[in-house]
Amino acid sequence: MASVDLTSLDFEEAILAPYQFGRVLRPQTGGALQRIDRLGNRWMISCRTPVMPIEPEGRIIGQMLDRAVRDGGIVRVRQPNFDPGAPGTPLVAGAVTSGREVDIDGLTPGYAIKAWQPISFVTGGVRYFDRVESQVIANSSGEATITLYNLLRAPLADNATVELGMPRLEGVVEITSPAPWPKDRMTYFEFTVTETK
């Protein structure tokens, strides 16, 4: 089944965090620390909605989240105080099978992809979220090569969709705090979305 679109939800708080499988090796004999990077590092986001009336907003959002727990969910990654501007219609330029570098075309010429800017890719029906490691400016043909924070978790197909203006994170939804149903008839929801791949 398709993931439930939760991009219309407002959040009182949304905390984006890396979900890493790499580790730091700490030698017992006093040697140098060593960071081991592993494939599969991904992202998760913890969300809390604003307080809302139980009826009808709480009922409607509760139903959406129940479906998302079963089918997965997609949330928009907000970028407070940052205007991503008009990136154009970016696509992956040529298939990429591994590493951190991705060629993109279809950008607005001169568009600046900022360091640590959120980005997501859609390939093979799956969405992958990450961050851009350092600033890059698209050339006059709307092309740029970006370096990602994480190693690629899956091959990106040529012409795969690139989401820069409104990046999204897709994955497993878990309710982290049951919604209260107090006498004042107001409620809120807390949940996480963790990428599966």
Image (tube, rainbow, N blue to C red):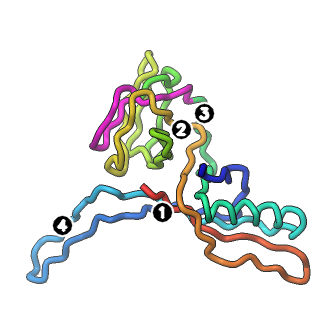
Counting from the top left corner in percent of width and height, residue 39 is at: 29, 56
The CA distance from mark 2 to mark 3 is 12 Å
Name which of mark 4 and mark 1 comes first in the sequence: 1
Q: Are marks 4 and 1 in contact (CB under 8 Å)?
A: no
| Residue underneath mark 2 | 163
| Residue underneath mark 3 | 85
The CA distance from mark 2 to mark 1 is 19 Å
- The label shown at residue 34 is 4
Name which of mark 4 and mark 3 comes first in the sequence: 4
Q: Residue at x 91, y 79 (%)?
A: 184
- The label shown at residue 99 is none
| Label 3 secondary element | loop
Front in this rendered view, residue 26 or 1:
1
- The label shown at residue 17 is 1
Q: Amino acid at mark 4?
A: Gln
Front in this rendered view, residue 60 or 144:
60
The CA distance from mark 4 to mark 2 is 34 Å
Q: Nearer the viewer, mark 3 or mark 1?
A: 1
| 98 in magenta | yes
In the rendered image, which quarter is residue 98 located in? top left
Q: Amino acid at mark 3?
A: Gly
| Label 1 secondary element | strand
Front in this rendered view, residue 117 or 42:
42
Q: What is the span of residues highlighted in magenta in the rendered image? A: 87-103
| 13 in magenta | no
Q: Residue at x 46, y 58 (%)?
A: 196
